[in-house]
């Protein structure tokens, strides 16, 4: 059985991709029609909260991806200098 080896870059990129997808879904939910059984303000507030959380996660995923790439670039430069 093969064991897939994932790099930190691949994991960070996957997390960023998933966070981007969650933001898209949250935007769609925010624009969607409200369920009849929920008051409009509550449904809108829940959709807004979901979007806020998705945007926060996207920011964290972006920071992780940037730091992983920066570390890798620093390591690569260090090898070239020696």
Image (cartoon, grey):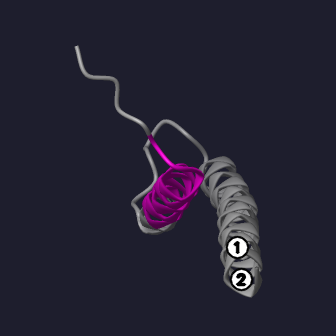
Relative to 78, residue 63 above or below: above
Which numbered disc flags the more N-terminal residue, 1 or 2? 1
Q: Kindly identify the residue that appears in the image at 67 percent across and 68 percent down.
A: 72
Magenta: main secondary structure: helix
Q: Quadrant of residue 74?
A: bottom right
Relative placement, left or right, of 43 versus 68 is: left
* Span highlighted in magenta in the image: 6-25
Label 2 residue SS? helix
Q: Name the element at disc 1.
A: helix
Per the image, is 76 magenta? Answer: no
Q: At which x and y percent is residue 75? A: 73, 70
Residue 14 position in % (x across, y down): 47, 53
- Residue 52 rendering spot, x and y as whole percentages: 72, 61
Question: Of residues 45 and 65, which is closer to you in this image?
Answer: 65
Tell me what residue is drawn at x 35 percent, y 32 percent. 4
Q: Is residue 81 above or below residue 16?
A: below
Q: Spatial distance from mark 1 to mark 2, Cα to Cα?
A: 16 Å
Q: Residue most toward the front?
A: 82
Q: Which residue is mark 1?
A: 66
| Residue occupying image coordinates x 59% and y 51% | 8
Neighbor class of circle 1 (other Cα within 10 Å; few <14, some 14-19, many 20+) is some
Q: Position of residue 62 (x, y in %)?
A: 67, 69
Residue, disc 2: 77
Mark whose residue sits in front, 1 or 2: 2
Q: Is residue 4 left or right of residue 18?
A: left
Question: Where, quadrant-wise, is the C terminus in this rendering?
Answer: bottom right
Q: Is residue 65 above or below residue 41?
A: below
Marks 1 & 2, CB-CB < 8 Å contact: no
């Amino acid at each position: 059985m093969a064991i897939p080896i994932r790099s930190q870059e691949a994991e960070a990129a996957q997390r960023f991709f998933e966070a981007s997808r969650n933001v898209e879904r949250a935007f769609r939910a925010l624009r969607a029609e409200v369920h009849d059984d929920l008051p409009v303000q509550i449904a809108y507030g829940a959709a807004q909260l979901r979007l806020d959380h998705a945007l926060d996660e996207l920011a964290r995923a972006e920071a992780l991806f940037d730091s992983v790439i920066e570390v890798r670039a620093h390591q690569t430069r260090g090898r070239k200098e020696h």
